[in-house]
Amino acid sequence: MAVRWRVNGIYKADAETIYNEITSLGEQFTPNDVVNLAMDENTALHPLFEWDDTKAASKYRESQARSIICNIVVQNDVETEEGNEKVFVRAIVNTNERTKTYQTIERTVTRKDDYTLLLAAALRELKAFKKKYAALSSDLSWLFEGIDKIAI
């Protein structure tokens, strides 16, 4: 089994070393277990964490803000064969993954460039879903075929 980072360059550490340290915790572990292990300055995990409590608190609040932003939804009524169905979509979307900027879905769908970027992100997420679950079950082959047919 080859161990690597999903995205190269995010962490300045060898993925296999980090994997071995984390799995040394046993068959099951929690994120808190990993943090506790990383407190040891002799681990490869240690430098991957922010240990300055002031900076860490600020980063945590930013993470909370992202969670809040991503959990606001708007309700749309969609006509289906069974009648009207309530569909909930994110009210605020990430319009630039590099700069992590957000805007309302209403603004995004009315701006051609932003809408194209949103559709491209949706397609990337579908392809990632396919890649993630392709090895697990052939029961989803019909769905994967549909994903393959989508073109933007």
Image (cartoon, grey):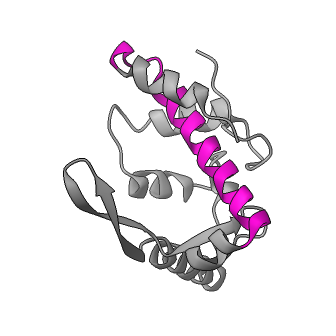
Figure disc tally = 0
Vertically, is 18 above or below 30?
above
Return the x and y of residue 74 as percentages of the image width and height: 40, 76
Q: Nearer the viewer, residue 99 or 145?
A: 145
Residue 110, horizontal then vertical, whole percent: 67, 74
Compared with residue 150, is residue 85 higher up or lower down, i.e. above or below? below
Q: Is residue 122 left or right of residue 142?
A: right
- Residue at 76% across / 65% down in the picture? 112
Vertically, is 82 above or below 142?
below
| Picture quadrant where residue 140 is located | top left
* Residue in view at x 59 percent, y 27 percent: 149
Most foreground residue, 134 or 45: 134
From the viewer's perspective, tell me whether residue 29 is left or right of residue 69.
left
Whether 6 is among the magenta residues is: no
Q: What stretch is highlighted in magenta?
A: 111-139
Asked whether the viewer can see residue 56, the reply is no
**Is 8 on the left or on the right of 64, as rendered?**
right
Magenta-highlighted stretch: main secondary structure?
A: helix
Tell me where residue 55 sits by quadrant.
Answer: bottom right
- In-front residue for pair 53/128: 128
Indicate the position of residue 4 as horizontal and vertical percent values: 67, 30
Q: Which residue appears at 50% of the width and 39% of the height?
A: 22
Q: Magenta segment: does it hold 114?
A: yes
